């Protein structure tokens, strides 16, 4: 009985690991996380976020 539990657990870990590695592979095939940091893009995003929060304050 103990052996069946151990074999079942090993099987579950193998199947789950196969699934996770497949998802990781697809993520990396699509480019993954961009390795480049763009300061200008970050500044535009911060300004847009500030403008959005300011417009929300004006509506209340």
Image (cartoon, grey):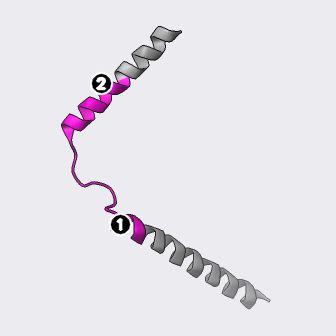
* Residue 31 vertical position relative to residue 52 in the rendered view, above or below: below
Closer to us: 16 or 44: 44
- The correct choice, above or below, for 45 with respect to 18 in the image is above
| Marks 2 and 1 in Cβ contact (< 8 Å) | no
Task: Give coordinates of residue 48: x percent, y percent.
Answer: 33, 26
35 sits left or right of 5 in the view: left
Q: Position of residue 45 (x, y in %)?
A: 31, 32
Is disc 1 surrounded by few (<14), some (14 to 19) or many (20+) residues within 10 Å?
A: few
- Tag shown at residue 47: 2
Q: Secondary structure at mark 2?
A: helix
SS for dot 1: helix
Q: Is residue 11 above or below residue 39?
A: below
Point out residue 5 in the picture as x, y percentages from the top left corner.
Answer: 73, 84
Q: Is residue 28 one of those drawn in magenta?
A: yes
Q: Residues within 10 Å of mark 2 (few under 14, many from 20)?
A: few
**Where is mark 1, residue-wise?**
28
Residue at 40% in and 21% down: 52
Residue 56 - label: none
Query: Which quadrant of the rendered structure holds the N terminus?
Result: bottom right
Q: Is residue 3 above or below residue 12?
A: below
- The residue sitting at 34% across, 60% down in the picture is 32
Residue shown at 35%/21% (left/top)?
50
Magenta segment, which residues? Answer: 25-49
Q: Is residue 11 left or right of residue 40?
A: right
**Residue at the location (62% across, 83% down)?**
10
Most common secondary structure along the magenta stretch:
helix
Of labels 2 and 1, earlier in sequence is 1
From the viewer's perspective, is 51 left or right of 43?
Answer: right
């Amino acid at each position: 009985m103990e052996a069946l539990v151990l074999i079942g657990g090993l099987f579950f870990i193998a199947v789950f690991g196969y699934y996770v590695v497949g998802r990781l592979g697809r993520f990396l095939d699509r480019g993954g996380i961009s390795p480049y940091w763009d300061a200008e893009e970050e500044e535009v995003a911060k300004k847009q976020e500030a403008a959005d929060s300011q417009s929300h304050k004006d509506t209340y």
